[in-house]
Amino acid sequence: MLAQMRSATFIKAMMVIVAVAFVGLMVFEWGADFSSRGFATVGDNVGSVNGQEISVKQFEAEIRNDLQQAKARGNEDPEVSQIISQAWERVVTQILIGQQIDKYGIEVSDAEVNHVNRTQPAEWIQQQELFQTDGAFARAKYHQFLDNPSTYSDPRMKQFVFAAEANARSQLLSQKLEMLIAGSVKVTDAEIEQTHIERNEKVRVSYIGFDASDIPDSLALIAEAEVQTYYDEHLDEYQQDAAVRTAFVALPKTATARDEAEAKAEIDRVFKEAKAGEDFAELARVYSDGPSGSRGGDLGFFGKGRMVKPFEEVAFALKAGEISAPVKTQFGWHIIKAEETRGEADSLEVHARHILIEVRPGRDTLDSLRVLAEEFAEIAEDIGFDEAVNQKDLQSQDSDFITAGSFFPILGNSTSGLVNKFLRGSLGDVSSVYENDRGIHVFGLREIRDAGPRPLEEVKAQIQASLKEKKKVKVAADRLTEVMGQIKTGKSLEEAAAFFNLEVETPQAFARMGFVPGVGSRNAFIGTAFRLAEGQVSDIVTTDLGAYILRVDEKRAAGDLASEKEDLMQQLLSQKRQEVIEAWFADLRENADIVDNRHFFYANY
């Protein structure tokens, strides 16, 4: 068994697990002892939680572990900015939880840890082939490993056991804290019965209505005074954290004439090899930039209209076995080989392979852009962003206001750090150079806005859309007034609908928590349907989507509760406990003193 444990595959997986578990235990249990253990020095902390410092050394260990995990899962090029954000959230959470465990004096015994480790081993333990029989976890094999004295004479195996026990200890501490927070939550018989009714009682209706989306805009005009009044009365809805506005230059990664010429030279060289008799599929595997390259350029059978026109015209003109001269499309340069054809006329299909050389900016082009961006950033620091734009004959653009924790859309989710840095900066500050697949960018700080309501100008369109929607619903309801009058004179829903040339809709029976196509869910329509008696017709009912008159055609009882009472109770209990825990943690985090200094250490996150 120990020989198996020393296998390279097992050791590689185990060391990743051990590293993660060890760091997790360190954060979770050691808590405020970070600085006392010599990890942190003044000015060397990436942040703190309620005064408990997070050293750069510790945080980078978390990042390295996450990168190792990502690569172990097959992601050879993980997004570092995303990992930095995930690691930060995890560390903050672990520290907050650890502080609460210390606060309440929660402890676990070695006996409890041993019991959980043996009876509820972590998923990563169960997935180890060594502890499996026919692909399923075999508890006896794991116990044999734990009980074997030789396990503890091997440092690596001993470390594995340490990681497993650390995992069990963290699990127990968390469970005890959760029970302390939400253990008193109960579910009443009335709650169980109400949930049973909401899920199982059903109603079938017929209805007529008008969709608000069908009402023309000309019937829902919004005056400026209405917008201002709505804004004044709903200021709380437009509160926003502190935000920054920037100017930026974007240097797109566009291929030059030189890049075009290099791509053409490359496709011509490959074409010569193909015409000389080299294996076409192997050439595609070696040279093709397209996703089909790994398949030897195989595109399978395709009919007309499936490919871009220049490609299609050449492919369908080839005879089986023929190779085309280089063909230019929007995707780059292609060499096409026809393998076979089938069908005829409109059903004609060709089976082809191709080699694609994309026209993209080469190293020299990219290096020139990077040099230009670096030069621009340096000049902007000296003479100002706008002057640098003029001097370098560039074009700048303005961003919208971006709040703390958000990111610049042009760069994706790797610029929260830049936003936070600008929030602590001064007008005129210039960023470092940012690069992504689309281009290279430099930002200059234009404006810092304090937390508070967003200006009316920024939310005006949003308010107008909301008010317009409400007006359209009212117009829809007004259109049903005459229909309602006919019904009140004794006409049936169908007769009233026919009189006004309206269609009666008859959706399938639905529950209180169900969905009605075209009407929605959890709205006044649903509520009205369950309040009415069988055969009763409603007044005009409005929702966000329109206005309706409905009749209840059938009511179906919820059925026997006894058969699902226990399952419902467990579901509701788990749900209520989860809600309590989430609310408790949200409040805990909201009131925590969290200092985030990542922007001093990392450019992208």
Image (cartoon, helix red, strand yellow):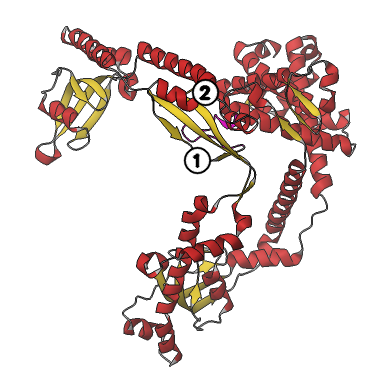
Residue 463 can be seen, yes or no: yes
Q: Amino acid at mark 1?
A: Asp
Residue 408 position (above or below residue 14): below
Identify the residue shown where x is 16% and y is 10%: 275
Residue 436 can be seen, yes or no: no
The 10 Å Cα crowd at callout 2, few under 14, some 14 to 19, many 20 or more, is: few
In this view, the residue in front, 297 or 469, is: 469
Secondary element at tag 1: loop
Secondary element at tag 2: loop
The image position of residue 388, as x and y in percent, is: 45, 22
Mark 2 or 1: the one toward you: 1
Q: Is residue 348 left or right of residue 419?
A: left
Q: Earlier in the sequence, mark 2 or mark 1?
A: 2
Residue identified by numbered label 1: 400
Identify the residue shown where x is 46% and y is 55%: 461
Identify the residue shown where x is 53% and y is 62%: 228
Kindly report the secondary structure that dominates the magenta region of the rendered protein.
Answer: loop
The residue sitting at the bottom extreme is 489
Q: Is residue 407 magenta?
A: yes
The image position of residue 479, as x and y in percent, is: 40, 78
In this view, the residue in front, 230 or 204, is: 230
Q: Is residue 410 magenta?
A: yes
- The residues colored magenta run 405-417
The residue sitting at the right extreme is 105
**Which corner quadrant of the image does residue 177 belong to?**
top right
Which quarter of the rendered picture does the N terminus lie within?
Answer: top right
